[in-house]
Image (tube, grey):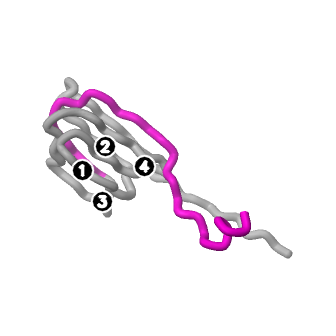
């Protein structure tokens, strides 16, 4: 039996933080949420959380992978993306 190899093409990403008041991010594939205190995006299979106060997205182009935001940025955190498991995989392990 031949095993198929999955290839994931990762976009090159870049994060530019200016004086903790503006951020530009490239390489995003999805925006998960956006509030005044948190912006969550997916970059190369990882979740990036931008935390702060009075955050607002000033420019968004998901098709090309760009996001610009403004506000008082206090933290940038990365975590692994939790992908939904196949129904049978959850039951049968």
User: Considering only vertical position in the picture, is 21 above or below 58?
Assistant: above
- The CA span between labels 4 and 3 is 11 Å
Report helix, strand or loop for mark 4.
Answer: strand
Residue at the disc numbered 2: 25
Q: Residue sitting at 28 percent across and 45 percent down?
A: 39
Placement of the C terminus among the 4 image quadrants = bottom right
- The CA span between labels 2 and 3 is 11 Å
Q: Nearer the viewer, residue 43 or 33?
A: 33
- Horizontal and vertical percent position of residue 84: 53, 63
Name the front one of labels 1 and 3: 1
Residue at the disc numbered 4: 43
- Horizontal and vertical percent position of residue 76: 35, 33
- Horizontal and vertical percent position of residue 9: 53, 58
Placement of the N terminus among the 4 image quadrants = bottom right
- The CA span between labels 1 and 4 is 15 Å
Badge 3: residue crowd in 10 Å (few <14, some 14–19, many ≥20)? some
Q: Is residue 87 magenta?
A: yes
Residue at the disc numbered 1: 34
Q: Residue sitting at 60 percent across and 72 percent down?
A: 87
The magenta region covers: 66-93
User: Considering only vertical position in the picture, is 80 above or below 19?
Assistant: below
Q: Is residue 64 magenta?
A: no
- The CA span between labels 1 and 2 is 14 Å
Name the front one of labels 1 and 2: 1
Residue at the disc numbered 3: 62
Contact between marks 2 and 4 (CB within 8 A): the answer is yes
Report helix, strand or loop for mark 1.
Answer: strand
């Amino acid at each position: 039996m031949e095993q198929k190899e999955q290839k994931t093409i990762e976009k090159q990403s870049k994060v530019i933080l200016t004086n903790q008041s503006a951020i530009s991010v490239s390489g995003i594939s999805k925006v998960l949420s956006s509030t005044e205190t948190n912006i969550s995006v997916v970059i190369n299979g990882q979740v990036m959380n931008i935390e702060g106060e009075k955050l607002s997205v000033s420019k968004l182009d998901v098709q090309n992978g760009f996001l610009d935001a403004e506000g008082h940025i206090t933290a940038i955190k990365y975590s692994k993306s939790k992908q939904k498991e196949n129904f049978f995989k959850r039951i049968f392990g």
